[in-house]
Amino acid sequence: MHASDTTQGRGAAGVAEFQGPSPRGGVVQPNRNLLDWDDKRISPLLAALVERWRPETHTFVLPVGEVTVTLEDVAHIFGLPIDGEPVSGWTDSSSDFVQSQSMAIFGRQPVLSRNSKSYIKLSWVRSIRDEESLDTEESIMRYVRCQIFCLLGSTLFTDKSTAYAHAKYLPLLRDFDRIHTYSWGSACLAHLYRALCRASRYDTKEMDDPLNLLFVWAWERMPCIAPVPRYILPPAEIPVAMRWSHSERSAAWLEKTVETFRNDIDYMQEGFDIGIICGSLSGGRTKE
């Protein structure tokens, strides 16, 4: 959504407007889930997109040429910073690491996954967030950290389960003043590329998220496969994904199959069916 300077301005605590409260201001009601996905309903579209993905070039091969999700797309769709420090670090799965990091971030012992002691239950993190009084700076900072951790685990860097998030992200949240300096958008895009490459293998039956990013990008770029016409949506503002969050899917779109989406893509028209996300931000509502 915003390239560099605009992104930096909106990413108050590191992840734009999804983060909940401003670290120095009032509290914004958080969005727990950006879009309400139903896997049975979006899997045909997912399959139609994945089969056109080429790992060698990290692009979708379409009748009108090759296209891909770019850093600028991530900035517009999610409002994440695409400049700054790399999102990197070490992965420590030891119990001592998880316990100490959890105490530093959440102020209490974590509730972990039974299958993996490195994964923290997101519903537990949300309960901590919702119990914060927000009457002190420490309480507000803990609220923001909880909200960002949930965003990382449920939207940006999810795996096949959105109920847990890996503890490896906790060290990135310890220094509150550095959270906004990380290039979260770059990391999110890299995660999507890796997920698409894995999903394109012949023996893969599932795909990790971030599906929010992939589908909003596809609907904005390729109106021919969108569930509703873009011109009936609210004007495009950063983050663009928000205007799709409450859109009603038509019965006809919900009944589409993989073959139907393949046909829609096969008969795309260059210039008409490839939308420009950035252009829609400056031009208000444009009827396709």
Image: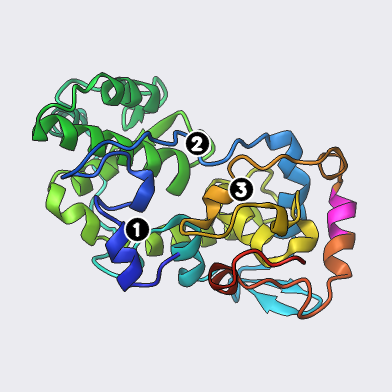
What separation in Å lies between label 1 and label 2 (alpha carbons)?
Answer: 18 Å
Instruction: Indicate the position of residue 236 as horizontal and vertical percent values.
Output: 56, 60
Q: What label sits on residue 34 in the rendered view? A: none
**Which numbered mark, 3 or 2, is in the foreground of this view?**
3
- Badge 3 or badge 2: first in the primary sequence: 2
Name the magenta segment's main secondary structure: helix
Q: Which residues are magenta?
A: 258-262
Q: Which structural element holds mark 1?
A: helix
Look at 39% across and 22% down and name the residue there.
123
Q: Amino acid at mark 1?
A: Trp
Look at 77% across and 67% down and name the residue there.
288
Label 1, residues with CA under 10 Å away: few <14, some 14-19, many ≥20: many
**Which numbered mark, 1 or 2, is in the foreground of this view?**
2
Q: Which residue is mark 1?
A: 184
Q: What label sits on residue 33 in the rendered view? A: 2
Given residues 151 and 168, the one toward you in this image is 151
Q: Which structural element holds mark 2?
A: loop
Label 2, residues with CA under 10 Å away: few <14, some 14-19, many ≥20: some
